Amino acid sequence: MSRRERLAEHDRYREWEGGYRSYDIVKEACIAFGVMLALAVVLTILFSSPDEKPSTVQSWARTDPVDFVTTATTELDGSSDTGGYGPPYNHASDGQHILFVRPQKWLGVSHPVNTAQDFVLAPLRSITGPPALQTAVSAYESASSDQQAKWTTAYENGLAKATASAGSTAISVPAGNYGPLPTMMAGLLGFAQSGGLDGALLSSKQFYQTDYTKPLLFMADGGVLSNRAQAEHLLGGQWGMMNETGSYPGQVWLWLYTFWYQIKPFSTSANADILVMAIMGVLSLALILVPFIPGIRDIPRWIPIYKLIWRDHYRSLAR
Amino acid sequence: MSISEHEGPALEHEPRSWSGALRDWAVRTLPPEKALPDKQPSYVASWIYVFGVLSLSSLAVIILSGTILALKGPGWWHFTGIGRFFNSVHLWSVELFFFVMVIHLWGKYFMAAWRGGRKAVWITGAITFLVAIPCALTGYVSQQNFDAQWISTQAKDAMNAAGIGSFFNLLNFGQMYSYHILVLPAAVVAIVIGHILLVRKHGVVPPFKLPATTAAAGGDGAGPDAEVSAS
């Protein structure tokens, strides 16, 4: 369709010069509201809504102490996901990018997280009690970084063969040269199992707390959330973005967003998130600009679903 | 100067006030008979037209149930049956909202509803859909349950990768709750109001004119002449 034809079409469709029929917009709105309210209430009565209790650091440490201690050790040496994340949490990496576009790096560290200090050392320092624990923390802090790395590496290897004691109150790690780590981790495990670490991870400069960045990052580095998510079909590979706990519908409208994560190169790319965000950004812009995009704006003319929509109108004209 | 001195036709010769100018512009742009019509074009006779008002209605149910939840606080619905009821109404009205809105959007697409100077109507509708998505996301991460924990820790990576995470922290419940109950709903409602006003101003897009061959065969065209004759 040429530009002139399109302009002529716009003029043709600007004002309706044909017939009218009576209509009550207020009555229609009231009836529609009643219908949608009734539908929502009926669905509520039939299905209610899901509400799976949240995981806590305490419940994690009690049910899977080996995973908890393993995660805490990776936080201590910075090898956890959060430890190597980069902005907005730390400077361990530049984050994801597309060619030279690095928004993650450009926006910088806005929520600083030092995994060793925030998740392990500071909580251990807050424990007042056994002097051996504070001595162990001091020994670790005063050791060289090489020595610290040797201890944590050896301990992580040992943790691969560790077992939980009866009742999961402690863990048993094969003998090795772990330095002060067994004492430190036993102290941290006990602190977590008592519920103290949940509060310690939330501590900040004021009494009231609403920011759960640190405890959530800590738990996400372990298996406590992902194990539950897998059982609930919420993992990325399970199209989890549009699923919900139980059998409830989730954010189904995100189907296209999660679709990209299922296919290559996105499913295997280290920059998958920024690539998918970029694609969805372009597609979102395209949705807004449909009236201006040749081809896309012409499809309704080529696939005449409008004949179905306005069939009564066309029939009345034929008569 | 008494109030009575302002009464009567003498006012017509005085300079117009800003308020008067704004009122005149508003009435000229959207006359009352267009804003609250009691008639509509004869071609508006399909079930697909229902999904626009159903979208607005489900949005109203969302706001109503969400307001009750907000007034009682974010923890209320976890511990009381009535709280769970309103949370469920909120959840299902959101599901219904997206369901009917997507049908409305597809319907308008296949009507090419941007024709005849109605591009802004389409654009505001599309933006409403896109802004509603983060509005829902912030609701999911404000639930204070396992669902919120999982969604926030997963979705943060996309936000961080795009740089958005530096000022929009999905792991910060307080920030997300503010976005969910104030900033984003206000944005959705504001855009929807603009969308409705534009629809009322421009009216519902008229049908396509059928090709001449179809018209000759008896299907008839939808050009101005044909439309007038059909009225």
Image (tube, coloured by chain):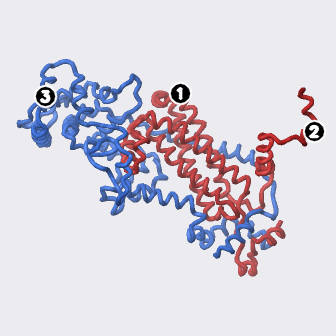
Pointers 1 and 3 within a single chain: no
Q: Give how far apart the Cα atoms at labels 1 and 2 are.
A: 55 Å
Q: Nearer the viewer, residue A211 or B5?
A: B5
Q: Give how far apart the Cα atoms at labels 3 and 2 are.
A: 93 Å
Residue A50, image x, y percentages: 44, 39
Element assignment for label 2: helix
Indicate the chain coloured blue by its letter: A
- Label 1 belongs to which residue? B72
Position of residue A314 relative to residue B28, above or below, is below
Q: Nearer the viewer, mark 3 or mark 2?
A: 2
Chain B tint as drawn: red
In the image, taking residue B181 as reference, residue A193 lies left or right, namely left
Position of residue B31 relative to residue B172, above or below, is below
Q: Nearer the viewer, mark 1 or mark 3?
A: 3
- Label 2 belongs to which residue? B10
Q: Amino acid at mark 1?
A: Lys
Q: Chain of mark 2?
A: B
Asked if marks 3 and 2 touch (Cβ < 8 Å), the reply is no
Residue A309, image x, y percentages: 67, 64
Position of residue B54 relative to residue A166, above or below, is below
Does residue A158 appear anywhere in the picture? no
- Marking on residue A183: 3
**Residue found 59% across the figure and 65% down from its top:** A292
Count of marks placed on residues: 3
Q: Nearer the viewer, residue B141 or A232?
A: B141
In the image, taking residue B146 as reference, residue B56 lies left or right, namely right
Residue A102, image x, y percentages: 36, 53
Q: Amino acid at mark 3?
A: Thr
Q: Could you tell which of marks 1 and 2 lies nearer the N-terminus?
A: 2
Q: Amino acid at mark 2?
A: Ala
